[in-house]
Image (cartoon, helix red, strand yellow):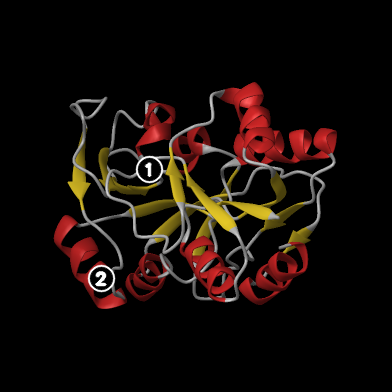
Amino acid sequence: MTILILSGTGEGREIAATLHQNGVSLIASLAGATRNPSDQAVQTRIGGFGGASGFETYLKEHEITAVLDATHPFARDISQRSHKICTVLNIPYCLFARPAWVATERDLWTSLADETEAAVHIKPSSTVFLATGRKTLNKFENLSNCRLICRQIDPPDGLFPFPNGEFLIGRPPFSTADEIALFRQLEVDWLVVKNAGGTASFSKLEAARELGLHVGMIERPDMPDAKTVTTVKHAIEWGLTHG
């Protein structure tokens, strides 16, 4: 019996390490979005599967008996595909979905259905810190009258897609104090983030709260109607049961 963990998150690493320590046979899979990913402490594969057919072939060839999906909360396509194929193959599937962030009375959050809605709320000439990753930068093209700053882990492969933007390289974790200092230095007016949940990247929201910055909060996409757990503890329990 071998569990495939679709990882790439801190919780995914924790789940994999604990299951491995308990003798569960498993393989961790990373999409390869980060050039130097953190060690998963278990047998790991990196890169895509080659679409739905490639994923199905992989499950069969490696005799995967269960799939634990601990990908990013915005990896909708991966989760939808994985659940669909596991259903067809009658392979148990479990989605780990950490709870979304919730605003407090001190937060100045604006809910966004997607990145393109940010321009509706952000005033011209604003400095906007984009903590949304480089893959969706094209959706901010309508913020041409603002200064855009996009932070990413790896150095960019090319120039910023718009003349009014720049990349900022940084590898987490970042403390709240560090984020406050950075936002002050850059004179940030707006922070735009995806509602990923969790504690790993919450410091930027704490910084925005302390500085009174406006936050454009991109809401999560719909995920598969599947077995879902919201804590690492329950994910590990599911893995122990199916491993």
Residue at (56, 74) in percent of width and height: 104
Closer to us: 23 or 16? 23
| Image x and y of residue 108, in percent | 49, 64
Residue contact between numbered discs 2 and 1, judged by CB atoms under 8 Å: no
Closer to us: 206 or 3? 3
Q: Quadrant of the N terminus?
A: bottom right
Q: Which mark is residue 133?
A: 1
Label 1 neighbour load within 10 Å: few <14, some 14-19, many 20+? few
For marks 2 and 1, give the one nearer the viewer. Answer: 1
| Image x and y of residue 68, in percent | 66, 54
Residue at (57, 42) in percent of width and height: 75
Q: Which mark is residue 37?
A: none
Q: Secondary structure at mark 1?
A: loop
- Judge left or right: residue 127 versus residue 61: left
- Judge left or right: residue 226 versus residue 134: right
Residue at (33, 45) in percent of width and height: 34
Number of labels in the image equals 2
Q: Earlier in the sequence, mark 2 or mark 1?
A: 1
Q: Which mark is residue 180?
A: 2
In three-dimensional space, the C-alpha distance between marks 2 and 1, rounded to whole angstroms, equals 20 Å
- Name the amino acid type tagged 1: Gly
Q: Quadrant of the C terminus?
A: bottom right
Closer to us: 177 or 78? 78
- Above or below, 136 against 229 in this view is above
Label 2 neighbour load within 10 Å: few <14, some 14-19, many 20+? many
Closer to us: 68 or 10? 68
Residue at (29, 31) in percent of width and height: 145
Q: Secondary structure at mark 2?
A: helix
